[in-house]
Amino acid sequence: MNFLKNFFAKFKVKNKSALRHGSYSVAIIAVVVAGVIVLNVLMGILSERGVLSFDITSSKVNTMDEENIEFIKSIDKEVTITVLSAEDAYIGGSMNEYASNYMNVIDDSEYFAQTVNILKQYPQINDKIKVVFENFYSNKTESLATEYPNLFYGDILVECGEESRLVTFDDIYSYSDDTGYADMGYGYYYVDGNNVETAVSSAINTLTSGETKKMALIASHSNSAVFTSLYSKTLALNGFELSEIKEAIVQTIPEGTDVLVIAAPTTDLLASEVTVINEWLDNGGKKGKSLIFVPGATMANLPVLKQFLAEWGIKYSSGLLYQTDKNYYYNTPTTMPMFISDSDITKEIAPKTGNFSLLGSNLVLEPAYEEYASRKTYIIASTNDTVTIAPEGASEDWTPSSSAEKKIYAGLVVTEETEIVDNAPHTSYVAAFSSQEFIYSTWASTDNVQNMDIAVNTAMFVSGMNTNKKVFVPKTITTESFAAELTEAEVLTVNIIFMAIIPLVITVLGVVVWVRRKRR
């Protein structure tokens, strides 16, 4: 017994250091192995959820923009996004079959797969948002048909509490046919753009913010195409319910309307219609109503409308604005930037990024007064001080004389009329632009100028909406930069890096540490 006791006592002393280092090694190996297992599990989960997809183009036009990601993160209510199609059917043949048979539209560039992958990003960003794929022939879809009679395969229902909004095929996809055959009744249109990110996020915004305003276009005096081309779609994305007043002579304004719009007027107002609009703006002394005016190519032959606007502090004169400084125009002297002006309400209307719009065909716009009775005018956007006036109908080679007056002209004028009601201010607004190109031009859909942003923010401000929230502008994304467009070789490379190389490196490092400690 003593022999065994002495033997183990000597062994314990002799191998104490080895046991200590061995314990460290075992612990390190255990941690490394556990890390490798956890990493592989996590990468598998992330891969299934679509995180391992990359937008490898320089423009990254198909990656959710940072502002939208921040918006999605800010949602603090439970939201369900239901796609009315099984996931594999949406990506596979069924969606294309329905689109071609009922819409005469074909997707040959994987836009439908793109939609699915973008939608899957929402719950990854915010776990309060859930995405569900529902068979189109389920009981849920049948119950929706009474509320949405034009329900289509693959439509997306966004729900928050008891409220819901439907995002349709046309809300998501743009499509065209370069051959012209489809317009003639044969052939197909082809999907060429995807707006799912903006359409779904704006629906979430409307449902969670609870802010909705009613806007009516006076269609009988407007060029509806100017309003509906892009502006109306953008307004709808930002919480406006849109309608049209089509009666030849406006006698009443629909109840509940918050904002009226006259866009590119085609005929003049009657005196009786001016009375109706003024009474509506006054709202029985309670105010809180607004009108937005977007001019056409000229204000000639519109004397009643011009007088109405002048009484509201907005003056249009004949001619077109002409930029004399070549550093401040684009291509021609009549296409120029409008810069954000310094006024009391500019900060409410000005977009949060950028500070200028680019516009051609600017009419001569100025405030008729600064203050009159309870009305006050503000210049929101304006030119620099090197602008003069070209006569209407001037030839392309017209140039101003050396003595021509040069000064600042307005691009956007807003007039407010405020009354104190029950010890609180109540305000109505009239806003007028210098050019229809704020909402109807190539520049209206160009990201690096602020035409549409200013037009939308103006509508939000005069309607009483929160102008600090995200403004949604249609963002057409293409499949050229989409993550699903990664080649098989690129996908294999990603998998090798995350599923083999990284675990192998960790394992080798663990073995090296173990060997070094064992030799001590």
Image (cartoon, helix red, strand yellow):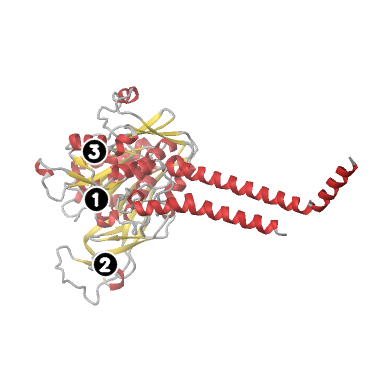
Does the CB distance between marks 2 and 3 fall below 8 Å? no
For the residues labelled 2 and 1, the Cα–Cα distance comes to 33 Å
Looking at the rendered structure, the secondary structure element under dot 1 is helix
Looking at the rendered structure, the secondary structure element under dot 2 is loop
Q: Earlier in the sequence, mark 1 or mark 3?
A: 3
Q: Measured along the vertical axis of the image, is residue 520 above or below residue 109?
A: below
| Residue at the bottom extreme, as displayed | 402
Does the CB distance between marks 1 and 3 fall below 8 Å? no
Name the kind of residue labelled 2 in the image: Tyr
For the residues labelled 1 and 3, the Cα–Cα distance comes to 54 Å
Residue 33 or residue 375, whichever sits in front: 33
At 18% from the left and 50% from the top, the residue drawn is 302
Foreground tag (2 vs 3): 3
Looking at the rendered structure, the secondary structure element under dot 3 is helix
The C terminus lies in quadrant: bottom right
The N terminus lies in quadrant: top right
Name the kind of residue labelled 3 in the image: Asn
Dot 3, crowdedness within 10 Å: few (<14), some or many (≥20)? many
Dot 2, crowdedness within 10 Å: few (<14), some or many (≥20)? some
Q: Earlier in the sequence, mark 2 or mark 1?
A: 1
Residue 512 or residue 50, whichever sits in front: 512
User: Can residue 482 be seen from the camera position used here?
Assistant: yes
Foreground tag (1 vs 3): 3
**Would you name the residue on which mark 2 appears?**
330
Disc number at residue 96?
3
Q: Measured along the vertical axis of the image, is residue 382 above or below residue 106?
A: below
Q: Earlier in the sequence, mark 2 or mark 3?
A: 3
**Would you name the residue on which mark 1 appears?**
307
